[in-house]
C-alpha cells in the first residue's frame, strides 16, 4: 500500500478528543499522546519550530499517524496511560519503577485470616493497598495482632466441621493470641465485629475501635473485673499511640490524594500521599525521565493517572500544586493556606528528599549522568552558550603589597584537575593593585595557551567583583577572546555573580549546585594562592635574616640553607661546621651575629 503523505493524514484528523500514535518508516511506534482536539494538537507538531532537539528529530521520523477517538479528554488521559505502558514508545516519558507492591489480604472465608501478600487472587477476598514497603505492612499487622486475637491456621472452619470436633486448639490459643474458633470457643459474630474494626484501622480510622474498647473497659470496671479492664486499657493505649504517630494534620481531612512535582532538565519526581482521617496511609515517589521537554502539567497529569491506577485509589478529592485536567468525577483543590497547604508542602519535601537520595545514588552508580546533570544545570543557571566542562578560576594574594602572587585552578567536568593548577609571580605591577594584577595574570595565562595551541576553557571565574572582572575582560579583549570564552566574577560578601557590562548581579539559590561548584573553585584558588604566597613570604624572611649579615649574599644564604635545612640549625652550628660551607672568615661573622 503506498505511503499517504503526512499533509493528507493531517487533513483527515477529527476535531475531537482522543489519542494519537506516531509511527516511523518501519511501522514502529515513536510516540503516543492525548489531545482535546486531535487535528489541532497533531498538526502543531508539523507547523511549530521546535526548540527542543529530540522533538525535531522525532518529527522528521514520522511517516504515519493513527488515532483513537474517545468521548472526553479524561478518557483520552486514561487510554494514553494504558497504551504507553503497553508499547513503551521511544519518545514517551519513562516511569522509572515497575515493581510489585505488598497488599494486606482479608481472606474470603469463615473466620477470615489477615496476612500480607504480593499476589492478588480473584476469589472474593478483600485487598488493601498496595503499600510502598513491606515494613509498613508488618507494622500495621503487628498493631492489629496486638489488639485483636485472630486465627493464623488455614483450616476450613465450617460450622459442620467445628460441630463434629474435627479440630483442636493449638499453641496460639494457649498463648492468648487466638480465642479458639476452631473448637467453637469464639462466635462468628464476635470475630466478624473484629474484622469490621480492622477494616477501619487499615483505612486509617480508629474511631470505631476506640469507642468499642472504651465502652467495654467501663463495663468491666463497673463489674469490678479490673484485670480484664486493664487489658482493654492497654489495647486502647496501643491504638492511641499509633494514631498519634500517624495523624499529622486535621483528622477531618479524609479520603484525599495529594500530589506534588519537583522538576529538572531531564527528570521529574512526583510524590503521592494518600490521607485517611488525617493520617498518611500511603506515600510513594515516582521518578519520570523526560523525553521531549514535557511541561510539569503534562508530567503531573500522567503521574496522577498512573499512580491512582497502580494503587487502586478510590479517593474522590485531589490536592494539587496547580490545576491539571483529571477525571470529571474528581474534586481538585489547590491549597493556599492552613492544613491543606501544610500537607501539600510535606508532599513537596518528600519529593525533594527522594531526589536528593537519587542524586547520592547516581553519584556512585552513574557518575557520568551526575556530571551531565550538573553541567547542564550550570549552563542554564549562568546563561552560557555551552556546558562549562572546562572552568578556570583566578585569585590574587598579597599582604600590604608584599610578594604579590596569583593562582589559577582548573576544574574539568565539575572536579579539580590539580595537575593543571598554576602559580604566577606578579611581574609588572608595583604595590597592592588587585585590578592590574588580575589583568596581568589573565593575559599571561591565555597568551600562553594560544601560543601552545592548548584548549581554552568554556568558563572563566574571577574571584572578585566588578573591578577585577573588568580588568580580566581587558586582557581577553587584547587577545581577541572576548565573546569566545564566558567570564564571570563572584563577590565574596553576598556571593553575587557579575557578568561583563551588566551592573545588576545574579543571585543563585544558596543550595544551588551551580553556586557550590563556583564556591569550590573560588575556595580552591584562594587556598592554592595563599599557600604559595605564604611559602614565598617565609622564604623571603629567612633569606633577609641571613643576607643582613655583612658579607653574606643571596647565593651564600641559599648554600647555607641547603646544607643546614633551617635558620635555627645555622644559629646552633659551630664555627668549624659553618666554615666547611662558607670559609672561616664568613663563618666567624655568622657565628658572632647569632651569639
Image (tube, grey):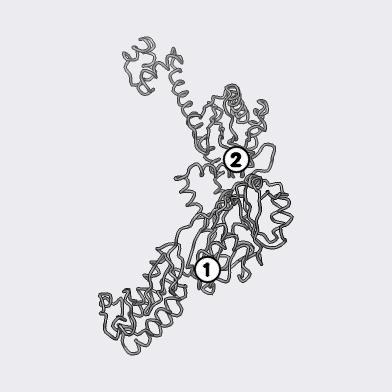
Q: Is residue 505 above or below residue 107?
A: above
Q: Quadrant of residue 194?
A: bottom left
Mark 2 vs mark 1: which is more N-terminal?
1
Q: Is residue 474 above or below residue 517?
A: above
- Percent x, y of residue 176: 28, 77
Q: Secondary structure under badge 2? A: strand
Q: Residue furthest front?
A: 1
Residue at 44 percent across and 67 percent down: it is 120
| Residue 274 appears left or right of 138 | right
Q: Which of 241/149 is in front? A: 149
Q: Residue furthest bottom?
A: 223
Q: Which of 245/35 is in front? A: 35
Q: Which of 345/578 is in front? A: 345
In front of the other: label 2 or label 1?
Answer: 1
| Residue 105 appears left or right of 333 | left
For label 1, the residue is: 313
Mark 2, other Cα within 10 Å: few <14 / some 14–19 / many ≥20: some
Q: Quadrant of residue 567?
A: top left
Q: Are marks 2 and 1 in contact (CB under 8 Å)?
A: no
Q: Which of 411/149 is in front? A: 149
Q: Is residue 359 above or below residue 212?
A: above
Mark 1, other Cα within 10 Å: few <14 / some 14–19 / many ≥20: some
- Percent x, y of residue 380: 62, 44
| Residue 508 appears left or right of 97 | right
- Percent x, y of residue 413: 53, 38
Residue at 47 percent across and 23 percent down: it is 540
For the C terminus, the quadrant is top left
For label 2, the residue is: 491
Q: Secondary structure under badge 1? A: loop
Amino acid at each position: 500500500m503506498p505511503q499517504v503523505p503526512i499533509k493528507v493524514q493531517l487533513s483527515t484528523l477529527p476535531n475531537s478528543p482522543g489519542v494519537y500514535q506516531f509511527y516511523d518508516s518501519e511501522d514502529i511506534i515513536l510516540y503516543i499522546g492525548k489531545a482535546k482536539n486531535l487535528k489541532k494538537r497533531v498538526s502543531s507538531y508539523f507547523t511549530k519550530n521546535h526548540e527542543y532537539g529530540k522533538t525535531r528529530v522525532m518529527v522528521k521520523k514520522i511517516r504515519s499517524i493513527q488515532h483513537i477517538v474517545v468521548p472526553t479528554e479524561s478518557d483520552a488521559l486514561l487510554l494514553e496511560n494504558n497504551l504507553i505502558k503497553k508499547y513503551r514508545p521511544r519518545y514517551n516519558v519513562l516511569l522509572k519503577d515497575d515493581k510489585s507492591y505488598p497488599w494486606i489480604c482479608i481472606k474470603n472465608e469463615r473466620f477470615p485470616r489477615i496476612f500480607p501478600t504480593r499476589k492478588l487472587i480473584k476469589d472474593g477476598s478483600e485487598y488493601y493497598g498496595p503499600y510502598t514497603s513491606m515494613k509498613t505492612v508488618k507494622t500495621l499487622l503487628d498493631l492489629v495482632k496486638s489488639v485483636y486475637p485472630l486465627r493464623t491456621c488455614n483450616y476450613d472452619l465450617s460450622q459442620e466441621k467445628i460441630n463434629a470436633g474435627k479440630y483442636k486448639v493449638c499453641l496460639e490459643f494457649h498463648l492468648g493470641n487466638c480465642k479458639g474458633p476452631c473448637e467453637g470457643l469464639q462466635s462468628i459474630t464476635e470475630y466478624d465485629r473484629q474484622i469490621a474494626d480492622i477494616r477501619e484501622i487499615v483505612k486509617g480510622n480508629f474511631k470505631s475501635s476506640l469507642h468499642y474498647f472504651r465502652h467495654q473497659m467501663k463495663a468491666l470496671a463497673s463489674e469490678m473485673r479490673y484485670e480484664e479492664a486493664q487489658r482493654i486499657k492497654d489495647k486502647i493505649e496501643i491504638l492511641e499511640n499509633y494514631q498519634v504517630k500517624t495523624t499529622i494534620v486535621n483528622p477531618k481531612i479524609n479520603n484525599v490524594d495529594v500530589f506534588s512535582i519537583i522538576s529538572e532538565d531531564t527528570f521529574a519526581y512526583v510524590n503521592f500521599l494518600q490521607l485517611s482521617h488525617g493520617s498518611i496511609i500511603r506515600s510513594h515517589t515516582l521518578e519520570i525521565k523526560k523525553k521531549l521537554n514535557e511541561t510539569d502539567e503534562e508530567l503531573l497529569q500522567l503521574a496522577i493517572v498512573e499512580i491512582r491506577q497502580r494503587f487502586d485509589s478510590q479517593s474522590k478529592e485531589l490536592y494539587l500544586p496547580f490545576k491539571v485536567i483529571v477525571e470529571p468525577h474528581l474534586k481538585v483543590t489547590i491549597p493556599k493556606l492552613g492544613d491543606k497547604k501544610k500537607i501539600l508542602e510535606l508532599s513537596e519535601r518528600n519529593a525533594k528528599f527522594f531526589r536528593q537520595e537519587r542524586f547520592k545514588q547516581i553519584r556512585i552508580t552513574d557518575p557520568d549522568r551526575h556530571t551531565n546533570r550538573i553541567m547542564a544545570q550550570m549552563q542554564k543557571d549562568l546563561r552560557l552558550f555551552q556546558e562549562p566542562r572546562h572552568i578556570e578560576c583566578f585569585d590574587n594574594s598579597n599582604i600590604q603589597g608584599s610578594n604579590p602572587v596569583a593562582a589559577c585552578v582548573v576544574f574539568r567536568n565539575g572536579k579539580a584537575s590539580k595537575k593543571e593548577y598554576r602559580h604566577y609571580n606578579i611581574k609588572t605591577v608595583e604595590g597592592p593593585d588587585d585590578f592590574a594584577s588580575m589583568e596581568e595574570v589573565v593575559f599571561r595565562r591565555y597568551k600562553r595557551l594560544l601560543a601552545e595551541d592548548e584548549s581554552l576553557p568554556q568558563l572563566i571565574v574571577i574571584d572578585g567583583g566588578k573591578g577585577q572582572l573588568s580588568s580580566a575582560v581587558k586582557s581577553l579583549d587584547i587577545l581577541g577572546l572576548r565573546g569566545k570564552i564566558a567570564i564571570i566574577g563572584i563577590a565574596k560578601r553576598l556571593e553575587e555573580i557579575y557578568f561583563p557590562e551588566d551592573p545588576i548581579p545574579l543571585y543563585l539559590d544558596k543550595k544551588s549546585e551551580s553556586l557550590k561548584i563556583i564556591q569550590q573553585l573560588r575556595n580552591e584558588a584562594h587556598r592554592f594562592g595563599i599557600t604559595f604566597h605564604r611559602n614565598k613570604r617565609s622564604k623571603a624572611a629567612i633569606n633577609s635574616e641571613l643576607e643582613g649579615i655583612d658579607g653574606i649574599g643571596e647565593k651564600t644564604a641559599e648554600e647555607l640553607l641547603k646544607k643546614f635545612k633551617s635558620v635555627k640549625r645555622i644559629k646552633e652550628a659551630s664555627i668549624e661546621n659553618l666554615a666547611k660551607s662558607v670559609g672561616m672568615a664568613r663563618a666567624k661573622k655568622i657565628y658572632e651575629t647569632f651569639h
